[in-house]
Image (cartoon, rainbow, N blue to C red):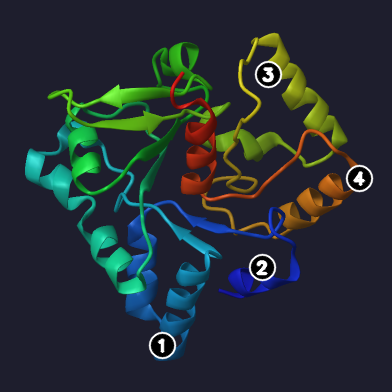
Amino acid sequence: IEFAHKAKDYPEGSRFVWNVEVAWAADLYLQRMNEQQRADFLEAVKNGSVALNGMYLNTLTGLCRPEELLRLFKFSTELSKKCNTKIDAAMMSDVPGNTWGTVTAMAQAGIKYFSTAPNYFDRIGDILVKWENKPFYWSSPSGKEKVLVWIPYKGYAFSHGTVLSSDFVASYTKELQNRDYPYDIAYIRWSGHGDNAVPEIEISDFVKDWNNKYDWPKFVIASTSTAFSAFEKKYGDQ
């Protein structure tokens, strides 16, 4: 919550947003903290400093029965009502695939966007070769529902070996150019320098300083929903 409160010190676009990947983290926090801390958390969710995602856990969905798939979104659905905040995005990390029924379960829970980001080099088949930075609509088995799926560059762990700097910007934009990336909106996962890392408030300073100095590219610290909805608004019909 201290990170969420510090967001007030930054202009829109550069402020820190704590993107809670799985709802279990919020559930655990609300169970363990005192009344004031719980109130602070719910307020941070309402004002956008804390962004909640819909899936309860990083689950191997291929092992789930249909009811288990639906229940993955039960807690976030209830919490969104409590906070009067829409939760329309889900995230997954380190897992290389999802069963088809996940689309149906997401759509029925109001999930429109899915940021799935596998390990970037090990035990993943060819998922990154085929789908890295190639956003697409994934239709449900019935064909009546869909979610926007977007696998970011180097999966969930891009930040593990990256230092925020002008060299990073040059390298990343060159990579997009080399791949003939056709859009002017891209996103990366920033999960800290290693698994289970603490939130890095430094990214707010980097983004604020960069945007003050340069016109392009422009960096925005965003929730999953904010990033995906901006992309869909501009390119969804393509």
Image quarter of residue 170:
top right
Residue 176, numbered label:
3
Dot 1: within a 10 Å radius of its alpha carbon, few (fewer than 14), some, or many (20 or more) residues? few
Name the residue at 33% across, 44% down. 58
Between marks 4 and 3, how big is the CA–CA gap? 22 Å
Question: Of helix, strand and loop, which one carries label 3?
Answer: helix
Q: Please tell me which of labels 3 and 2 falls first in the chain.
A: 2
Between marks 2 and 1, how big is the CA–CA gap? 22 Å
Tell me where residue 169 appears, x and y as whole percent: 79, 31
Q: The disc labelled 1 sits on which kind of residue?
A: Asn
Residue 7, numbered label:
2
Image quarter of residue 123:
top left
Between marks 3 and 2, how big is the CA–CA gap? 30 Å
Between marks 2 and 4, how big is the CA–CA gap? 21 Å
Question: Which residue matches tag 4?
Answer: 213
Between marks 4 and 1, how big is the CA–CA gap? 42 Å
Dot 3: within a 10 Å radius of its alpha carbon, few (fewer than 14), some, or many (20 or more) residues? some
